[in-house]
């Protein structure tokens, strides 16, 4: 069988080691690893199994569809899903033991009507996204407490998410979280699982760890912010392609659409079979580099849908040679962070943007 033109090599052992390391850096009673968006591009089932092997006790996803995919794959560990359609009926999720992050009064009632289930109440402590807001909080808590007391559902958790704007802002959000916990306790409800901290906050703020921390991007060996570059984590993904053509250009020859780049001198260029349809950001045009045989070379000309062109100068390359697009920079390959900088975005955007014709290979 021929080598796939475009391939993502994923090390499940790296994810496992990263989770073990993160549990050392941010110990808590429970550790959740988030595998939404197909495991941040790494493969959700692979990431979930590796995370559990590394000591995670919970798996997090965005929506119920992602949770059911894990159940279909045989993942039996606790799974939390927190983003729901307005008309979600919750029946299958409850039947398959998916814990539900609940943000509205209507969702509470829908869970009760669906036969009851286990919920984590999601409150907005200041991020301004999902979670019940302050104007509905009192009624939301009253409703949750009444349904919990009647046995129509089980309030197992309280959750939120900090903004990461500043230490002071995160701690202010935590104060709202604690006040809400206390309001619930006064109504006779004391959830077992309290969680507000994702990767950066879990590492930086011990007081925000409560009973559970959530790790997303860090579990895959990528720093959540530039202040977290030296955590002892290993990137779990390497994105590769292959050279499919090599040609010599004369000085003045143009490359790709609009001739944004022309050869300043005679040179050799290599055509690589990967483009923005595969997740290579078009916005990195004119700045990106790739690795061939341990050496970095510039990507020249406009990044196209299916291909990029690499100026290799006088280096000896041939069709079939492997091209490292991003991966572990210790081997000379550009990092995900490099590509994020070149495209003026963040690492999350890079790894979750991989196209569906890219073959994923588990290196274990």
Image (spheres, helix red, strand yellow):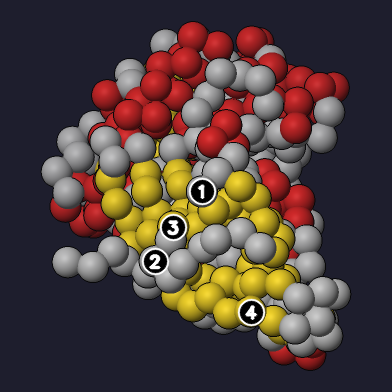
The residue to which callout 3 is attached is 322
In percent of the image, x 56 and y 18: which residue is there? 232
Comes first in the chain, label 4 or label 3: 4
Q: CA distance from mark 4 to mark 1?
A: 19 Å
The residue under label 2 is 320
Q: Residues within 10 Å of mark 4 (few under 14, many from 20)?
A: some
In 3D space, how far apart are the residues under numbered discs 1 and 2 (Cα atoms)?
12 Å
Asked whether residue 82 appears in the rendered view, the answer is no
**Residue appearing at x 39%, y 66% in the figure:** 320
Could you say where residue 279 lies in the image, as x and y percent from the top left? 54, 66
Q: Quadrant of the C terminus?
A: top left
How dense is the environment of label 1, judged by Cα within 10 Å: few (below 14), some, or many (20 and up)? few
Marks 2, 4: nearer the viewer: 4
Q: Tell me, yes or no, whether the two marked residues, 1 and 2, touch with CB atoms within 8 Å.
A: no
Q: Nearer the viewer, mark 4 or mark 1?
A: 4
Between 280 and 39, the one nearer to me in the picture: 280
Q: Nearer the viewer, residue 298 or 128?
A: 298
- Of label 2 and label 4, which has the lower sequence position? 4
Dot 4 falls on a residue whose secondary structure is strand
Res. 293 mark? 1
Q: Which residue is mark 4?
A: 248
Mark 2 and mark 3 in contact? Answer it, CB < 8 Å.
no
Q: Is residue 30 above or below residue 119?
A: above
Q: Report the Cα–Cα distance between label 2 and label 4.
A: 17 Å
Q: Earlier in the sequence, mark 1 or mark 3?
A: 1
Which sits earlier in the primary sequence, circle 4 or circle 1? 4
Q: Nearer the viewer, residue 235 or 128?
A: 235
Q: Secondary structure at mark 3?
A: strand
Circle 2 packing at 10 Å, graded few (<14), some (14-19), many (20+), is some
- Give above or below for 222 relative to 56: below
Question: In x, y percent, where is residue 306?
Answer: 52, 79
Q: Is residue 281 left or right of residue 60?
A: right
């Amino acid at each position: 069988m021929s080598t796939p033109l475009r391939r993502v090599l994923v090390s499940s052992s790296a994810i496992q080691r990263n989770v073990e390391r993160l549990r050392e850096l941010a110990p808590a009673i429970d550790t959740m690893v988030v595998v939404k968006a197909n495991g941040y591009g790494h493969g959700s089932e692979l990431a979930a199994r590796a995370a559990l092997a590394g000591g995670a006790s919970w798996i997090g996803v965005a929506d119920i569809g992602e949770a059911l995919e894990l159940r279909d794959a045989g993942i039996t560990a606790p799974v939390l899903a927190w983003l729901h359609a307005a008309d979600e009926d919750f029946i299958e999720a409850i039947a398959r033991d998916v814990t539900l992050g609940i943000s509205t009064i209507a969702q509470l009632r829908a869970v009760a009507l669906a036969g009851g289930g286990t919920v984590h109440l999601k409150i907005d402590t200041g991020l301004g996204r999902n979670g019940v807001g302050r104007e509905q909080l009192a009624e939301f808590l009253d409703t949750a407490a009444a349904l919990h007391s009647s046995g129509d559902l089980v309030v197992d958790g309280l959750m939120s998410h900090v903004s990461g704007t500043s230490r002071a802002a995160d701690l202010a959000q935590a104060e709202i979280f604690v006040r809400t916990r206390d309001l619930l306790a006064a109504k006779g409800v004391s959830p077992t699982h309290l969680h507000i901290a994702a990767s950066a906050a879990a590492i930086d703020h011990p007081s925000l760890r409560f009973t559970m921390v959530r790790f997303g991007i860090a579990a895959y060996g990528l720093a959540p912010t530039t202040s977290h570059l030296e955590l002892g984590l290993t990137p779990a993904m390497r994105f590769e392609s292959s050279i499919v053509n090599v040609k010599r250009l004369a000085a003045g020859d143009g490359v790709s659409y609009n001739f944004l780049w022309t050869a300043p001198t005679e040179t050799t260029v290599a055509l690589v079979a990967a483009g923005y349809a595969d997740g290579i950001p078009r916005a990195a045009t004119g700045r990106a580099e790739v690795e061939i045989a341990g050496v970095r070379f510039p990507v020249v000309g406009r990044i196209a849908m299916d291909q990029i062109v690499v100026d290799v100068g006088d280096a000896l390359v041939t069709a079939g040679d492997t091209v490292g697009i991003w991966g572990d920079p210790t081997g000379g390959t550009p990092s995900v962070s490099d590509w994020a900088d070149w495209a003026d975005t963040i690492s999350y955007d890079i790894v979750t943007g991989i196209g569906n014709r890219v073959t994923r290979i588990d290196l274990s």
